[in-house]
Image (cartoon, grey):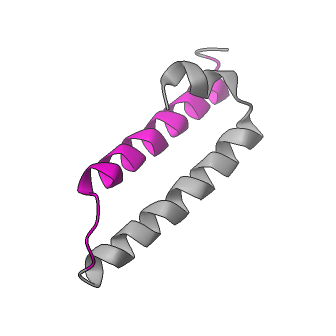
């Protein structure tokens, strides 16, 4: 998900997206711990997307961006 797409969503939608991504990340970590094959690149992508969403939300709180 690009920053442009994130900025177009409301805070409620972003919070829901974070919860979905955290659940997916948990499942991937669980698969990794149990020795199942996982996509390590997907874990990295999820972490970066969560960070982007949180950054945009912080910008909104501080009034840096619209």
- Magenta residues, start to end: 36-63
Whether the magenta-drawn stretch holds residue 44 is answered as yes
Q: Residue at x 48, y 25 (%)?
A: 2
Most distant residue in the bottom direction: 34
User: Along the horizontal axis of the image, is 66 left or right of 39?
Assistant: right
Q: Position of residue 16 (x, y in %)?
A: 69, 50
Which residue is nearer to you in this view: 1 or 53? Answer: 1
The relative height of residue 46 versus residue 36 in the rendered view (above or below) is above
In this picture, is 3 found above or below 29?
above
Up/down of 63 relative to 19, above or below: above
* Residue 20, image quadrant: bottom right
The quarter of the picture where residue 59 lies is top right
Quarter of the image for residue 12 reads top right
Whether residue 40 appears in magenta in the rendering, the answer is yes
Quadrant where the image shows the C terminus: top right
With 22 as the anchor, is 14 left or right in this view? right
Looking at the image, which residue sits at the far front? Answer: 37
Instruction: Give the residue displayed 74% in from the left and 31% down from the top.
Output: 10
Looking at the picture, how far across and down is residue 45, in whole percent? 36, 44
Give 59 or 47, whichever is nearer the viewer.
47
Q: Main secondary structure of the magenta part?
A: helix
Percent x, y of residue 33: 28, 80
């Amino acid at each position: 998900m690009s920053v442009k797409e994130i900025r177009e969503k409301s805070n409620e939608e972003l919070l829901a997206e974070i919860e979905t991504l955290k659940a997916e990340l948990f499942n991937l970590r669980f698969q990794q711990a149990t020795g199942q094959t996982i996509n390590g690149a997907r874990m990295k992508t999820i972490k970066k997307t969560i960070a982007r969403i949180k950054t945009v939300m912080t910008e909104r709180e501080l009034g840096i961006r619209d």
